[in-house]
Amino acid sequence: MADKQELKSIFLKLNDESDTIALAEQLAPLLCGTDPRLPDAVPGGRIHLRGDLGTGKTSFARAFLRAAGIRGRIKSPSYALLESYKLSNLYFYHLDFYRFRDPREWLDAGFREILQKEAVVLIEWPEQAGNSLPPPDLEISLEYADIGRNVRLAAHSNRGLSWLITLAPSLQKYLAEDNPGAAW
Ligand SMILES: Nc1ncnc2c1ncn2[C@@H]1O[C@H](COP(=O)(O)OP(=O)(O)OP(=O)(O)O)[C@@H](O)[C@H]1O
Ligand SMILES: [Mg+2]
């Protein structure tokens, strides 16, 4: 359901992991500030990844980080809670709150300052952090479908909206059939 901060949402059908990877590869340059389609974009931004176990949150994050230029092993943060990277002065934080039971843990762990920086932040299981997280620029919700995944992209900020508008032409082939949000 749309909340009052949601500016726009579109629905996609991603048939297999290569489609999830393609979506990540489309988004990464926008947050890195290297996409020629959005030349004035300031690097940084926050994405929340929602969906049941195994729906593809880490697949997306890994492909995103790879497309951003991170080399070497990209670990899932399911145990460490946080994996961080730095690439030409831009910080990348990949978080997974699945194991969080008490939102105070988040405050105690000092992660809050991560949100204050101009960084790229990807958060799996944001709902586990309770109300302590501000809304993201973009929320990606993944759901199991008969084949592949039904995916919803929801912009919660003007920055997220600019990403969706920029991406729209490249996402045409993934658009779900019943897609009220896709009318621009
Ligand atoms: N669009 C897709 N259609 C079908 N399978 C997909 C799709 N995208 C990713 N997958 C597959 O789904 C699985 C996703 O695993 P992944 O670890 O990314 O899930 P997760 O959402 O991070 O789970 P967890 O909540 O446990 O962290 C992988 O096996 C991947 O190949
Ligand atoms: Mg995961």
Image (cartoon, rainbow, N blue to C red):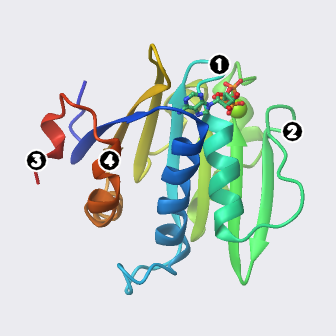
Q: Earlier in the sequence, mark 1 or mark 2?
A: 1
Q: Amino acid at mark 2?
A: Ala
Q: Which sits in the foreground, 108 or 62? A: 62
Q: Which sits in the foreground, 128 or 70? A: 70
Q: Is residue 133 above or below residue 168?
A: above
Secondary structure at badge 2 equals loop
Asked if labels 4 and 1 touch by Cβ distance under 8 angstroms, the answer is no
**How far apart are labels 1 and 4 at the CA level?**
26 Å
Packing grade of label 2 (10 A; few <14, some 14-19, many >=20) is few
Secondary structure at badge 1 equals loop
**For residue 80, which numbered disc appears in the image?**
2
Q: Which sits in the foreground, 106 or 56? A: 56
Asked if labels 2 and 4 touch by Cβ distance under 8 angstroms, the answer is no
Q: What residue sits right under mark 3 in the picture? A: 183
Q: What residue sits right under mark 1 in the picture? A: 53
Q: Which sits in the foreground, 40 or 82? A: 40
Q: Earlier in the sequence, mark 1 or mark 4?
A: 1
Secondary structure at badge 3 equals loop
Which quarter of the image is occupied by the C terminus? bottom left
**How far apart are labels 4 and 2 at the CA level?**
36 Å
Looking at the rendered image, the disc whose residue lies closer to the viewer, 4 or 3, is: 4
Ligand 1: which quarter?
Answer: top right
Which quarter of the image is occupied by the N terminus? top left
**For residue 173, which numbered disc appears in the image?**
4
Q: Amino acid at mark 1?
A: Leu
Q: Give the left or right position of residue 90, taking residue 13 as reference.
A: right
Query: Disc 1, ligand 1: is the CB inside 8 Å?
Result: yes
Packing grade of label 4 (10 A; few <14, some 14-19, many >=20) is few
Looking at the rendered image, the disc whose residue lies closer to the viewer, 1 or 4, is: 4
Q: Amino acid at mark 3?
A: Ala
